Amino acid sequence: MKKKVVIIGVIAVIASLLIYAFEIEPNWIETTHTKIKISDTTDENFSCNLLVISDFHVASEEHEKFLEKVVNEINKISKTERIDAVIIDGDIIDYKTEEIKFLAPLKNIEHKNVYAVLGNHDYSYGWSHKEIADEVEKYMKDSGVDVMRNENRVICGGKIRMVGIDELWSGQYNLSKSYDVKEEKQNKQKILPNVLISHNPDIIYVLKDEHPDLIISGHTHGGQVKIPFLGPVTMPSNVGKICPEGLCNVSGYEIYITRGIGGNPRVRFLSRPEISVIELNFI
């Protein structure tokens, strides 16, 4: 009798964990706030607020409904807090062209300054289908999103240069092109503090002369499924093995990794979907 009770108890615990991991946590969005100081001395009172989301992996109508929930949350945050820019940090679709239509909720983001970079999944299987990445880019641009593929933008009242690198694993990234700031070099203007947006945090290992003040990445899903005391079940990033989420210093680089909002399959355990609000302050 005792053995039967124990078995029933174990089954009940396992069932509860599965329901939590597949149904509750993947839909339980957390908005986090992180203050980060970057090196500059021009304006001690200046701050720049970035809202970062990543890793949609949309692949179905279910994902589209969740993305709509995320967009509603972004709009609420933008109304209650000062947000200078919204950044979408890659893995927007999961693999296929037909998944792009599920990105429709992005058209409802009310903030005027929305930027994006692409991730490995946006290049489809083998991370090698540029034609699919181009279609993702076109849809995003038609939705009012400024997609950066080895480009940079000046944001936050001209105080910050944001550098958007194309996906590392696709082989399409180009650091020299991304950091091309001819006007500053020609006019001998002060080089602005720069924030590098890269879906994959392993971009750190290919940086040469470039030394961003901050790197913002996704890709790791924060581990997505973590075993207590052991950590993530799997981790597709060498940097992620050191820093699966949050703000870290890796190899001398300051990097912030957001947990992202999705995943396919949509399962999460001890790694809730995250909307990251980052406040940059000058030292």
Image (tube, rainbow, N blue to C red):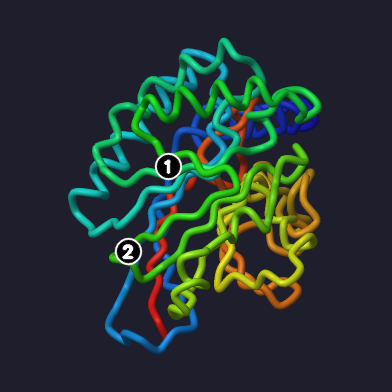
Q: Which residue is mark 1?
A: 29
Give the Cα separation between the discs numbered 2 and 1.
26 Å
Q: Which mark is residue 154?
A: none
The percent position of residue 81, horizontal first and vertical second, equals 23, 57
Toward the viewer: 68 or 215? 215
Query: Which residue is painted at 33% across and 67% down in the image?
Result: 158
Q: Quadrant of residue 29?
A: top left
Q: Which residue is mark 2?
A: 156
Residue 1: tell me if it is visible: no
The percent position of residue 188, horizontal first and vertical second, equals 47, 79
Mark nearest the camera among 2 and 1 is 2
The percent position of residue 96, horizontal first and vertical second, equals 64, 16
First-in-chain label (2 vs 1): 1
Helix, strand or loop at mark 1: loop
Query: Which residue is painted at 63% across and 38% down in the image?
Result: 119
Query: Which residue is painted at 76% across and 74% down in the image?
Result: 251
- In what quadrant of the picture does the N terminus appear? top right
Q: State left or right for residue 136 relative to residue 146.
A: right
Toward the viewer: 213 or 33? 213
Label 1: few (<14), some (14–19) or many (≥20) C-alpha neighbours in 10 Å = some
Q: State left or right for residue 247 relative to residue 220.
A: left
Amino acid type of the residue tagged 1 in the rendering: Ile
